[in-house]
Amino acid sequence: MTSEGALYGQSLYDLAKEEQITDRLLEELEMVGSLFSENTDYITLLLEPSIPRKERLGLVDDAFRGQVHSYVLNLLKLMLENNLLREFNACVRQYRASYNEDNGIAEAVVTSAVPLTDGEVEQLTAKLEQFTGKKILLTQKVDETVLGGLCVETDGKRLDGTVTGKLDDMRRMLSDIVL
């Protein structure tokens, strides 16, 4: 994460917390981030130096005024003015990280060879919440190369119970044996 994006995200979070609108701004930031991801040409247009800055700011104003809180709109304009709009995702990540920390939320990613059933997701989420003591936001990834089992990453920890992981562990143990 870049320091500029993190700084903007943390500053906005601090302001939103003071105003007690952290939930609303998180939702709006993620919506704008999603729009930017889906419309990369729009970002390219907003960063085009041959278009006058005032006109580019007007484009942002036209697109988002009345759709997002004025703090989010002003953040977009400020980042555009400082040529930092490409750091918007880093800003959102920092905002979410601060939000999660204040609200006892941990994000977890589970990787499996096949998609988990709803029941398996509920069981895994409950176990992770018990393990971490936090509310878990679980994201699933399917990777056929893991062969079987689960790999869970949360709070900087990796719990690898995949067949591939176990085979790698065995390979390392065997290579450490001196013949």
Image (cartoon, rainbow, N blue to C red):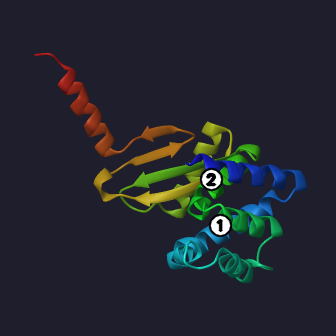
Label 1 belongs to which residue? Answer: 80
Q: Quadrant of the C terminus?
A: top left
Q: Residue at coordinates 53% horizontally, 57% vertically from top-left?
A: 139
Residue 1 horizontal/vertical position (percent): 55, 48
Q: Element under label 1?
A: helix
In terms of sequence position, does the residue under pointer 1 or pointer 2 come before the other?
2
Packing grade of label 2 (10 A; few <14, some 14-19, many >=20) is many
Q: Element under label 2?
A: helix
Residue 38 horizontal/vertical position (percent): 53, 76
- The picture quadrant where one finds residue 85 is bottom right
Q: Amino acid at mark 1?
A: Leu
Q: Residue at coordinates 77% horizontally, 73% vertically from top-left?
A: 68
Q: Nearer the viewer, residue 160 or 91?
A: 91
Q: Nearer the viewer, residue 119 or 15?
A: 15
Q: Amino acid at mark 2?
A: Gly
Q: Residue at coordinates 84% horizontally, 60% vertically from top-left?
A: 21
For this orientation, the residue located farthest to the left is: 179
Residue 161 horizontal/vertical position (percent): 39, 41
* In the displayed structure image, the side of residue 87 where residue 146 appears, left or right: left
Q: Is residue 73 above or below residue 15?
A: below
Q: Residue at coordinates 40% horizontally, 54% vertically from top-left?
A: 112
For this orientation, the residue located farthest to the bottom is: 62
Label 2 belongs to which residue? Answer: 5
* In the displayed structure image, the side of residue 18 where residue 145 appears, left or right: left
* In the displayed structure image, the side of residue 51 where residue 60 appears, left or right: right
User: Residue 25 bears which disc, if any?
Assistant: none
Cβ–Cβ under 8 Å for marks 1 and 2? no
Q: In front: mark 1 or mark 2? A: 1
